Structures are given as C-alpha cells and as structure tokens.
Amino acid sequence: MRVGSFGSTATMLATMLVGTLSSMAQAASGGSSTVNTLTRATFDSYLETGTQRQRSCLVMFHVDWCKVCQRTFPKFANASGAVNQAGITLDFAHVDCTEEKALCQRFEVRGYPTIKFFPWEKDKKPRNFKSLRTEEGFVKYARRMTAPLVQHFANADDFNRSLVNETMSAFVAAVPSGEVPAELLDAAEEWRDRHVFTTAKQFKDLLPPGLPTPTSNAWLAVLSWGRQQWSGVDNTSKAAPAVAYFSGPVGEVADWLTHHRFPGIWALEESTFWEFTHASRRTAICALDPARVTKDQEAGLRTTADKLKDDFLFGVLDGVALQEELIDFSIAKGTLPRVLVTEDNFEYWVEDVQLLRVDHL
C-alpha cells in the first residue's frame, strides 16, 4: 500500500491531470478583445461605474514573467470579445501586478494568475474564479453569473436542451407554492458559478423519466445527466442519468448540497476532475482501460458505488490516455484497472496494487 500526504504536491499533480485532460478539449474560437487595463488610480472608479451601470466585472491579476499567465491571458482576452459580441452584461479587466503590487496585495493575490469576479452590487464581496481557464470556460462563466439565480424552464425537454453543454450537475427544487426557501437561495448564490438551480411544482415536471422514485417528503434533487456518467462496458452508448434526493429540513440544505454534487459514477474529464477531487468528500477514482473493461468489473464497481455512496464519490478515468500522469501515483498501464482513493480535497491519497483494484472493491 502506498499513502501520499504531500499537500501542494498533490495539488500540483491534480493540476497536471487537469492540464492533460484539457489538451484533449477542442480549442476555443477567437474574438476581439475588450479587456480594460486597471491601475490603483482607476480601479475603484471603474468598479463604481460598473455599479451605476449594473455591470459586474471579471478581473485577471497577473505578472508578465508567469508562463501560465502568458497562456491564459489570450483566452481571457478572446472571451471578453465573445462576451461583448453576445451582449452579455459582464466586463473584463486586468491588473499587472508587476506594476501594481499594492493593488494586488489589497485583494490578497498570492498566486498568478488570480481571477476574481466583482459583483456590481455593493453588498456582495468579490469571489475567486473557479471554472475552466479557457475561452469557452470564461464565456460560460459570464453567462452563468449574469443569469437569474434560480432559472426557469418550461418543461423537461427545455431543461435538457438548455443545459446540453453543462459539465456539472443541476439542482431542482420541488416547490408547489413557487416560493424558494431562503436557505436554498443562499446555497444557490454560493454555487451559482458551477451549478444551475431551478424549481418545479413537482420533480416529474423537469427530471427525465426512469430515475429512482423520490420519497414523499423529498424536496430537492441533484441531477447528473447521462453524458456526465460512466457508460460502462458499452462505452459507445449514452449512460443513464443519476440523481440524489434531499428530504431534510431547510436548515441542513447547504451542507447536504455541498457534499452531494456528484451523484452516480462520473466519467471524469478536464471540466470536472478538479471539482470532483475537491468536493469535501472522500473519492474512489477508478483508472480503467476503456477497451478492456469486463461486465463483471462493471457490475462490481456499480454495486460498490451504490453501497458506499454515502461514504465516497465514485469516478472513472481513462487510464490509458493518462498513463504518464498516473505513474506519479504508482499506477502503471499494465496494472489497470486500479483504484485511487483521495481524502481531504486531494491532500491525502492511497493506492494499493493488490487491494485497491476494481476486482477487489
């Protein structure tokens, strides 16, 4: 058995996995830049103008010597043009911390690039950008942060069609009265940059058919579409969606939501890996060769995931595509399928070539 406890190193390796997965994603298209340059003399007045115009702002803090900044800024700039052309009411700006050290210290910038969202409302604090640093990621973030906190969908088809490009799960509250509990609104505000929230008079109005039936007192559901789920042996077909229900008091909804964002068995990709491994839950990540998974292995994994769903999040990685990165966790292609267990937001991880295998789960 090998146990890792290396803090920032684990974070670095997680980032490497995300980076490799990112290279598989389609490159975003270009757009004319509308990024404003801010200094200590102009920063506050610029945000004040945004407040008057009811326009929030996404600000990138960077330095010229940072390689990651050099790669990220063109995507950020292209996204600003795309957002402007789409008529989305979000401004883009940047601060050069090489020249504006005091301004960057004021906003506790400790690494580069740091990207922060500044709401136009004066009673709201800035928040760190936690989505994908791609043109598509920035544009999607802009749409999400300017959309209503709780969105409305006419029916299940509209719900599915509108969110076809979403990479994260969505939350559906069954509220016959139409009045959303304040506690859920607070949770939606916290997670709006990564998840869609909506309401229906009853779950069947929006959720796809074939899902497990909720208990009579369930009032909140987290839905993961089939395109986000592991399809198993038949990796050419679409997987079934997954769902989890909450029936507790409204005072406990924030904690439940935080720990139940990944129902089912996720097909981990560049857009979900970081959030999955930093979801304040223990995770069991299965590294597989998609072409060599057996029916028995799939059945074992699904049975285990169902039995331990309250203890672990379950996800699957393509162990062949990521074989170089997995070597850092002592997982070699020839030993697949293997299981990597992580805890404390990837601060700790465990692998065992004999015990932590799909056949032994």
Image: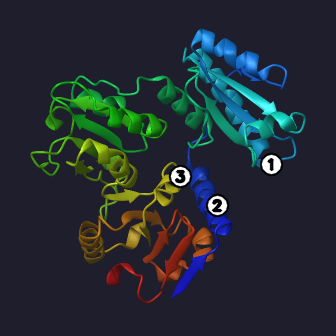
Marks 3 and 1 sit apart, C-alpha to C-alpha, by 20 Å
Residue matched to label 3 = 270
Query: Residue sitting at 68 percent across and 28 percent down?
Result: 78
Query: Residue sitting at 48 percent across and 86 percent down?
Result: 353
Can residue 230 be seen here? The reply is no
- Which is nearer the eye, 301 or 259? 259
Marks 2 and 1 sit apart, C-alpha to C-alpha, by 15 Å
Q: Quadrant of residue 259?
A: bottom left
Residue matched to label 2 = 16
Residue 155: image location, x then y, percent: 21, 27
**Which of pointers 2 and 1 lies earlier in the amino acid sequence?**
2
Which quadrant of the rendered structure holds the C terminus?
A: bottom left
The answer to whether the residues at label 3 and label 2 have Cβ atoms under 8 Å apart is: no
- Which is nearer the eye, 267 or 320? 267
Query: Residue sitting at 27 percent across and 37 percent down?
Result: 172
Regarding mark 3 in the picture, which secondary structure is present there?
A: loop
Residue matched to label 1 = 67
Identify whether 146 is placed above or below 10. Answer: above
